[in-house]
Image: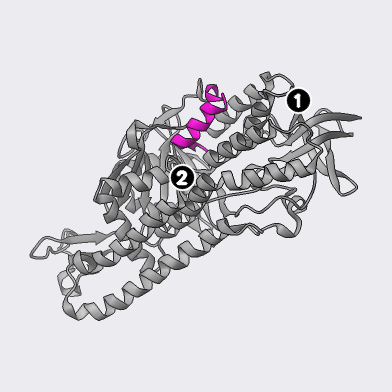
Amino acid sequence: MSLHYDVLIVGAGIAGSALAYALSQSSAQQRRIALLERSLAEPDRIVGELLQPAGVAFLDKLGLQGALEGIDAIPVHGYAVVQDGRIVHIPYPDGREGRSFHHGLFVQGLREHAMRAKGVDVIEATVNELVEEEGRVVGVKATRSSGKEKDVFRADLTIIADGCFSNFRSTVQGPSARPSNTRSHFCGAILKDARLPISQHGTVALVRGHGPVLLYQISEHDTRILVDVKGPIPSDLKKHIITEILPSLPNELHEPIRAALATERVRRMPNSFLPPAPQTHKRGVILVGDAWNMRHPLTGGGMTVALSDVYILSQHLDKINDLLDWSQMKDVLDKWWWERKGLAATINIMSIALYDVFGADDECLTVFQDGCFKYFERGGESVRGPVSLLSGIAPSTSLLAYHFFYVALYSIWALFAHPRRVRAPRANSEPHMNGTPNMTENGGVHTDEKHSGVHIMQMPSILDYPRLFWLSCRVLWTACAIFGPLLWTEIRWW
């Protein structure tokens, strides 16, 4: 059996469902669109649950704001960053709001819009292979859920949106394909009736020696916790979270986390980075969403980039009369490539750069992390600028570079001007009989529960300056080594 459509979309996730709906709203001509999805049951994922304010705005532009209704979505007004018991408030500027929710409910809302759209057929089928004729992709072979025979779905344009584990990425991109890089995993669970440090704010907890922990409310009673775990993954994740991570989190979260770990399976999701690559290798087919471009989910920017891509691409495809004319399609792909750069490049670069800083695993990055927290504590533009970048409100790589290197220089200045955290001499750190550590004269004592040691805050002496100067040079080099290669992945167009 063979069916013909104008556009064939593989994958009914965020990008695929939104694109099917957007293309159905074409003002030029009514197109027949097939949206193929392996399973139309509600998906169950631990990421893709926080939509930044810019993502909400693109959802409105696409006419899909109804997908947020009736799913118990929670308004998000910003972030709280936690380090060593201190909390800094990072609100979205100008009263902007994001939304957090159960991923599956949001996807089902997008699918329902696509199902109701004129000219869209939503089909439950597993795509097995691409169909090619004379070097051009003309459709796919797929097996419907209701049968065993493969059907051929033909289309003038095939769009692959099958997610981060795409089966067709290498085929579509050929030699221009860029390798994905998985540096860690998010290990997640759902907390019941947990109380976050600041209500209706995402919480990012910085855990020394480990990756960051992200928490946000996704319904009235449910709060998602995502623990970043670098490889190799411990064999006993629950024990790792309780012994290594829990002591660094706010006390009010300890009991909900313990309760969740006692009853839930800890699920994991790879945190991958995949830079975008040009899409002119194979005619008749393109990639969108995570099948083409991925970034670290720490910043919650993936869905925002996907919806931005859908909006820009659909606007350009609306102007094409003949989807078979690949010269017109190449022009569209070229325009899309550059128009998306402002937002996509900013969020892509920031996701990895911020993860490197928040997941500090060496001395230079630890200095950077401490300086970043102190930078946020300044308030004003030191908060407004970074959160505007993170939320997609200010899509500017130059503004991102400004704040990133400002933080690097501020971290270096803080090395000399601020008290630093040092281990107290052994004689002053012996505990009393009741387990309470001896206090220093100025009371500046900190107990590191992980290492059962006592730390004090101490100003550097002039004897420390040579070492701190060398450390400052290494911190600045580290900043360049992080930002430079990430910027190159976005500048490169071949």
Which amino acid does the dot numbered 2 rest on?
A: Pro
The x and y percentages for residue 460 are 19, 72
Asked if residue 38 is among those painted magenta in the image, a careful observer would answer no
Note whether residue 438 is visible. yes
Which amino acid does the dot numbered 1 rest on?
A: Arg
The x and y percentages for residue 26 are 68, 25
Question: Quarter holding the C terminus?
Answer: bottom right
Q: Is residue 236 above or below residue 60?
A: below
Q: Quadrant of residue 145?
A: top right
What residue is pinned by disc 1? 31
Mark positioned earlier in the residue sequence (2 or 1): 1
Q: Which residues are magenta?
A: 46-67
Residue at the image point whose x is 57% and y is 27% from the top = 62
Position of 205 compared to 446: left or right? Answer: right
Residue at the image point whose x is 13% and y is 64% from the top = 438
Q: Nearer the viewer, residue 86 or 425?
A: 86
The x and y percentages for residue 76 are 39, 33
Q: Nearer the viewer, residue 100 or 289?
A: 289
Question: Quarter holding the N terminus?
Answer: top right
Residue at the image point whose x is 51% and y is 47% from the top = 342
Q: Residues within 10 Å of mark 1 (few under 14, many from 20)?
A: some
What residue is pinned by disc 2? 395
Note whether residue 369 is visible. no
Q: Is residue 305 above or below residue 295?
A: above
Asked if residue 55 is among those painted magenta in the image, a careful observer would answer yes
Residue at the image point whose x is 65% and y is 31% from the top = 17
Number of numbered discs on residues: 2
Element at label 1:
loop
